[in-house]
Each structure stands twice: as C-alpha cells, then as structure tokens.
Image (cartoon, rainbow, N blue to C red):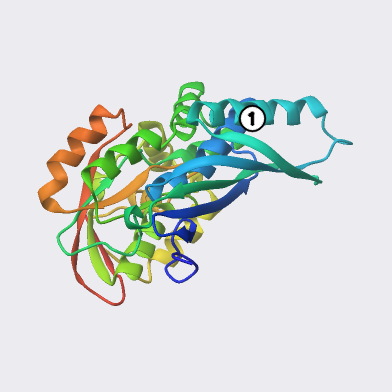
Amino acid sequence: MLVGFNTGDDCAVYRISDNLAVIQTVDYFTPVVDDPYQYGAIAVANALSDIYAMGARPLFALNIAGFHTKELPLEILSRIMKGGADKAREAGVAIIGGHTVDDREPKYGLAVTGVIEPSQIIHNSTARVGDILFLTKPLGVGIISTGIKRGTASTSAAARAVEIMSALNRDAAGAMAAVGVSACTDVTGYGLLGHLLAMTQASGMGARIHARAVPVIQAARDMIDADLDAAPGGSKKNLEYARRLVNFDPGITEAERLLLADAQTSGGLLISCPPQEADRLERALREAGAITAARIGFMEAEDDTGRVDVVP
C-alpha cells in the first residue's frame, strides 16, 4: 500500500511492481440538477476527478446506482447512465459493469480504477513553504445547485453550473503533471477551505488565501450577497468546521466566507506549486483549457495545526 487512510488523500494506491501501481476511488451522490442525462455526466466527471488530482490515468470503472423503479420510470435511470457513459467515453474510460440497488432516493456514481508510476504520484501531503496555490474551477456550484432545487436559480446560472461541473479535470491534470508540482487535491463536498485544510494538515503547513483572488461564479455571488440562506446546509456546516482553524480577516464578509466553504460537486483542482514553476504552470493550465488558472494564495510556514489565514 502506497497511499491509504493516513493523510486523507483522494485515492488509494497499491504497488504491483517497481514501476506500476493501481489507483482506485469511489464516489456517488444524489442528483444536483433536474436533467437525468446531465446528472449522470456530472457524477462521472466528479468520480474521475480524484484520479486526475493524483496525476494518474483512469482505465475503467464500475457503475454504482440506487434507483426505485416502482416510483420512477426506468427511462430516467437509462438517461442517467447514458450521460455517465458519454462522459466516460470523452475521458477514454471504459465502464465495464456495476451494481444497482433498490433505493427511493436516486444515487449514481462510479468506482474507478487507474494506473500510475509510483514515483509520479501527486499527494495532498507534500506541499512546501512558499508554494503558490492555484485553483482551476470557480466556486459557487453548491449555491446554484441549491437554487435549482428551490427554483431560485436563473436558467443561465443553472447552465453555467452544469458546464463547470461537467468539465473534466483531465487536461488541467495533464498540465500539472507536465510542469511538476508539490501537491494537489480536488475541491468537492468540503469546499475550498475544507480541502485546503486537509492539505495543510497533511503537509504540516500553514496557508494564506486572498479571498478576492478566488474565482467565483458571478450568479452564485449575487445569490449569496442577496440572501445568506442561499447557501446549502452542507456549506454552512463546512464553514462551522473551518472556523476552528481558519483566521478570517475582519474585512471578509459572511457571504465571502460561505463561498469559500461552499460544498462543490466536481470542483476544480487545488494545486500547490513551487514558486519558480508558477508562471509555467499558469501558462500550461491556460493552454490546456482550464476554466480558471487562478493564483489564490500561498503556503506560509511549517505549522502542525495546518492553520489557514484568509485576507481580502
């Protein structure tokens, strides 16, 4: 075992020879959008993201689904799996089986298997002092997804959130691996602050984030500025957890804090990059078509608590 539970990394990794390791992850969740096809595509992009975050290549996957055919037409499940299959095909990943259980609340996702050379693994626990932090997708899809469920999100906001959540992290990961970085994780259910704290704690580092350098979907910012209750319950819980280890500058508003803690689905890569490689990484990310290549902060000094300072 090369990577297990110890650092809360994105995948499990098991060495099978000197130059080859198997990497595996599993992720599934309830619908975040109304359209079954889009939901399937988002779920697959999300499941593959853990593999990409560690610099690996996904090979094949197994479907995991919960569905209640007595209450919902089977056609809905078919559309979910069609969306997933098409997204997997885009990624060059074969879905070769799976398992479905009878469940009143629909759920869908994948167990994904990939490969990586042991020396090429990108951990979440190896950030270094002075590293520049990059984020490759904007925040806010949790707020918009909640707005979709409540009927308060505009059509354009919903479409933008679906576009971001459906986007694969494959090309951004390729750019990251080509440049060489210190550490990486993807931003999903625990929000930017939660996943950054996992990185800082695993690395024994502190970090500083410039809140207004963090990319945010404008519609999400407008929604949370107008009403703090636009944030989903998961984002509020994330913020309550983060307050214990995050020092917020007094100038950071509660809306900004909720955005930094917003629970993401299929979010971007959070990359810790040596400062001498930062310009090269930014260029590589942009050339690869990353949605954003935002410099949002840096790793400060060694700190066993993993504290994070958030400034304007």
Q: Which quadrant would residue 135 be assigned to in this image?
A: top left
So how many labels did they put on this image? 1
Extreme residue toward the top, this view: 156
Horizontal and vertical percent position of residue 213: 22, 44
- Residue under label 1: 34
Point 13% across, 52% down: residue: 275
Q: Is residue 105 visible?
A: no
Q: Identify residue type, mark 1.
A: Asp
**Left/right of residue 237 with respect to residue 185 in the rendered view:** right
Residue 141 % position (x, y): 46, 39
Quadrant location of residue 167? top left
**Local crowd size for mark 1, using a 10 Å CA cut-off: few (<14), some (14–19), many (≥20):** few
Q: Is residue 71 above or below residue 115?
A: above
245 sits to left or right of 228: left
Q: Nearer the viewer, residue 28 or 142?
A: 28
Q: Position of residue 184 (x, y in %)?
A: 33, 53
Q: Is residue 252 left or right of residue 91?
A: left
User: Is 109 on the left or on the right of 175, as rendered?
Assistant: right
The one nearer the camera, 231 or 242, is: 242
Q: Residue at the far bottom: name it.
A: 304
Q: SS at mark 1?
A: loop
Single out the residue that lies furthest toward the front.
18
